[in-house]
Image (cartoon, rainbow, N blue to C red):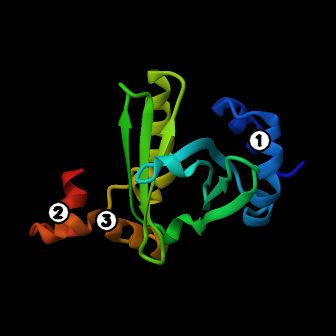
Amino acid sequence: MDVFSRTFLPAAAEAGVAIPTLSRHMPVFRRCVAADDTTALVARCTRADRPTQGEYMLLLTYRRLVVTQESRMLHRLRLHLNTELGHLGNVTWNPDPRLSAVELAATAVDGVRERFWIRVGHPKQVWHLDALLSHVFRPRAQRAGSGKAAGDGVPAATRDALRRDTGAWESLGRSRRDLAVAF
């Protein structure tokens, strides 16, 4: 059993997704994700800007984000989004414990802003999902806790992610170095 299969099933069980649903989505996910990629999150979600359009299945690994859409009547699948995490820009999420949900938003390579509403069963799971998303999307340099300024001596992909995260601060007159020192 490969790494993806070993980590996908426990993540799906944690999300409470039914086995028949997983069976329908698994061939699409298999085509999009490498066998050695670790699953971080499997969740049902809806589009925040189009809630009546149907249900989506979100698969988040440490390398990719894959979202499939299932039609309501015939249960036909359509690949909605398949991208590497490094190609996503302006990734944000807003936990809302009152509604037991998290809104995940990201800008894809084509410039389209994707917004997904992930519902969870209990308000405490909102904070678990928040911690998981910050672990996956936080740049490695910040995860390692290095004392260097942002962008110094880190790989180009991480440096680009730091630039995306700090772009708004630069427009307010702060530099990346000031921002890194502030955190």
> Quick check: 173 left or right of 19?
left
Q: Is mark 3 on a helix, strand or loop?
A: loop
Q: Mark 3 points at which residue?
A: 150
Side of 76 where 140 appears, left or right: left
Q: Residue at x 83, y 57 (%)?
A: 27
Q: Mark 1 points at which residue?
A: 21
Left or right? Give the position of 117 relative to 20.
left
Residue at image location 69% in from the left, 38% down from the top: 11
Q: Which amino acid does label 2 sit on?
A: Asp
* 159, above or below 16, in the image: below
Tell me the tag on residue 178: 2
Q: What residue type is disc 3 on?
A: Ala
- Point 50% across, 21% down: residue: 122
Q: What element carries label 1?
A: helix
Q: Do the residues labelled 3 and 2 touch (CB within 8 Å)?
A: no
* Residue 9 placement (x, y as % from top left): 77, 39
How far across and down, in percent of the image, does residue 157 sit?
A: 48, 72
- Of pointers 1 and 2, the one earlier in the residue sequence: 1
Total tally of numbered discs in the picture: 3
Q: Residues within 10 Å of mark 1 (few under 14, many from 20)?
A: few
Badge 2: few (under 14), some or many (20 or more) residues near its Cα, within 10 Å?
A: some
Q: Distance between the residues labelled 3 and 2?
A: 9 Å
x%, y% of residue 146? Answer: 38, 55
Question: Going from the N terminus, do you reach mark 3 or mark 2 first?
Answer: 3
Q: Distance between the residues labelled 1 and 2?
A: 48 Å
Residue 115, disc: none
* Whether residue 116 is visible: no
Question: Mark 3, mark 1: which one is toward the viewer?
Answer: 1
| Left or right position of 84 against 110 | right
